[in-house]
C-alpha cells in the first residue's frame, strides 16, 4: 500500500435532464451564475480555447480576483465531453499550485436521464484537491464538486436552487 | 451506475448501502485515500476477496463507489455526491424545520412579552 495521496477525484450524479441542458449549464454564463458558487464562465469551446470563471460581485467583495479560475480547453465534444485545465487563482497559494485537469462526461439515456461524471486530476495541487473534494461547509467555500453537482441537479430538475 | 428504477429510488439504494458496517469501513478507507485496488482494500478488512467484492458491488450500484481502469488494475473511487444529496435533501430539511420552529417559538414568546 502506498501512502501517496490520491491525485485523481471522481464525482458522478444522475440528473433528469437532457445532455444538452447539462452542457449549457456547465458552459454558459447565464447558467453558471445560477448554481454552485455562481459567477460567470467564459468558454472558447475548441481545443486550445480559453476558459475563465469570473467572480461575482459578492465574491469580489470577499476578496477573490475577477479572473477567479482560468484554464484552457483541451477537448470539446458538445454535449458529451469537455476536457480542460482548471487553475483556481483564489489566493497566492492556489495560484502557486500546478494547473489541474478537469473533465466532464455526459451520457444521456433514452429515458431522458443523464449521468454526469467529473474526473478531476489534481496532481501537484494538494490545496485545490482539498477544496474540490467537498465535505466542508458550502457557505465557507467548502462544498466542492459534491455540493456544486447536487445544486446543479436541484436547479435543472426543479428550476430552483437548494437553500443554503 | 445509478438508475431511476420504478419503486426503488436512489435514496433507498444509498441508505441500504450505508446500513452495513463493512461498507461504511470501505467508504472510510476510500475517504482516507482514494483510488484503491481491490487488493489494497482487502488488506484493510478481515474478509475474503469475494466478500469485499460483494460489498463493493452494492456500493457501486448505489453510486457511492466508481471504478476506473489504470493499466491492469481496477481502481475504486469514493463518489461523495449521493451523501451530499442526502445531506442537502434530508438533513438540512429537518434542521430547517427545527430552526423555523424555534423562530416561531421566539416570535410567539415575544408577542406574549409585549402583551404582559
Image (cartoon, coloured by chain):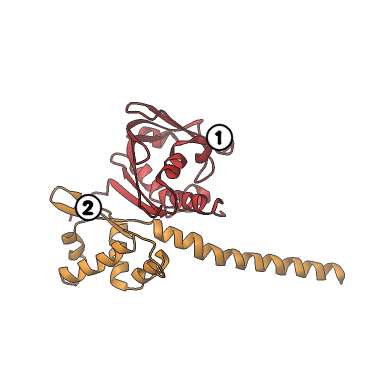
The image position of residue A160, as x and y in percent, is 56, 51
Q: Is residue A132 above or below residue B3?
A: above
The outermost residue toward the right is B116
Label 2: state its secondary structure. Answer: loop
Q: Colour of chain A?
A: red
Instruction: Name the N-terminal-most of marks 1 and 2.
Output: 2
Q: Nearer the viewer, residue A62 or A41?
A: A41
Q: Contact, CB < 8 Å: mark 1 with mark 2?
A: no
Q: Chain of mark 2?
A: A
Question: Label 1: which residue?
Answer: A60
How busy is the neighbourhood of tag 2: few (under 14 within 10 Å), some, or many (20 plus)?
few
Question: Label 2: which residue?
Answer: A3
Q: Chain of mark 1?
A: A
Label 1: state its secondary structure. Answer: helix
The image position of residue A135, as x and y in percent, is 42, 55
Colour orange, chain: B
Please report the residue visible at 53 percent of the width from the left and 37 percent of the height from the top.
Answer: A30
The image position of residue B78, as x and y in percent, is 31, 57
The outermost residue toward the left is B72
Q: Nearer the viewer, residue A131 or A14?
A: A14
Amino acid at each position: 500500500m502506498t501512502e501517496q495521496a490520491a491525485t485523481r477525484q471522481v464525482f458522478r450524479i444522475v440528473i433528469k435532464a437532457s445532455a444538452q441542458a447539462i452542457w449549457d449549464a456547465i458552459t454558459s454564463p447565464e447558467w453558471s451564475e445560477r448554481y454552485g458558487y455562481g459567477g460567470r464562465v467564459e468558454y472558447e469551446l475548441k481545443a486550445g480555447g480559453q476558459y475563465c470563471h469570473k467572480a461575482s460581485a459578492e465574491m469580489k467583495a470577499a476578496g477573490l480576483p475577477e479572473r477567479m479560475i482560468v484554464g484552457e480547453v483541451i477537448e470539446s465534444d458538445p454535449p458529451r465531453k469537455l476536457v480542460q485545465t482548471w487553475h483556481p487563482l483564489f489566493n497566492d497559494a492556489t495560484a502557486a499550485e500546478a494547473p489541474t485537469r478537469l473533465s466532464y462526461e455526459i451520457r444521456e439515456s433514452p429515458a431522458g436521464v443523464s449521468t454526469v461524471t467529473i474526473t478531476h486530476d489534481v496532481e501537484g495541487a494538494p490545496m485545490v484537491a482539498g477544496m474540490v473534494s467537498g465535505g466542508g461547509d458550502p457557505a465557507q467555500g467548502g462544498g466542492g464538486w459534491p455540493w456544486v453537482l447536487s445544486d446543479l441537479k436541484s436547479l435543472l430538475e426543479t428550476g430552483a436552487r437548494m437553500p443554503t | 451506475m445509478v438508475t431511476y428504477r420504478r419503486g426503488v429510488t436512489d435514496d433507498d439504494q444509498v441508505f441500504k448501502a450505508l446500513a452495513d458496517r463493512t461498507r461504511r469501513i470501505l467508504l472510510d478507507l476510500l475517504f482516507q485515500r482514494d483510488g484503491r485496488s481491490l487488493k489494497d482494500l482487502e488488506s484493510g478488512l478481515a474478509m475474503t476477496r469475494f466478500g469485499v467484492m460483494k460489498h463493493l458491488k452494492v456500493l457501486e450500484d448505489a453510486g457511492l463507489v466508481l471504478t476506473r481502469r489504470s493499466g491492469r488494475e481496477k481502481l475504486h473511487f469514493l463518489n461523495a455526491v449521493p451523501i451530499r444529496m442526502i445531506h442537502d435533501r434530508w438533513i438540512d430539511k429537518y434542521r430547517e424545520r427545527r430552526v423555523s420552529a424555534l423562530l416561531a417559538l421566539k416570535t410567539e414568546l415575544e408577542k406574549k412579552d409585549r402583551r404582559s
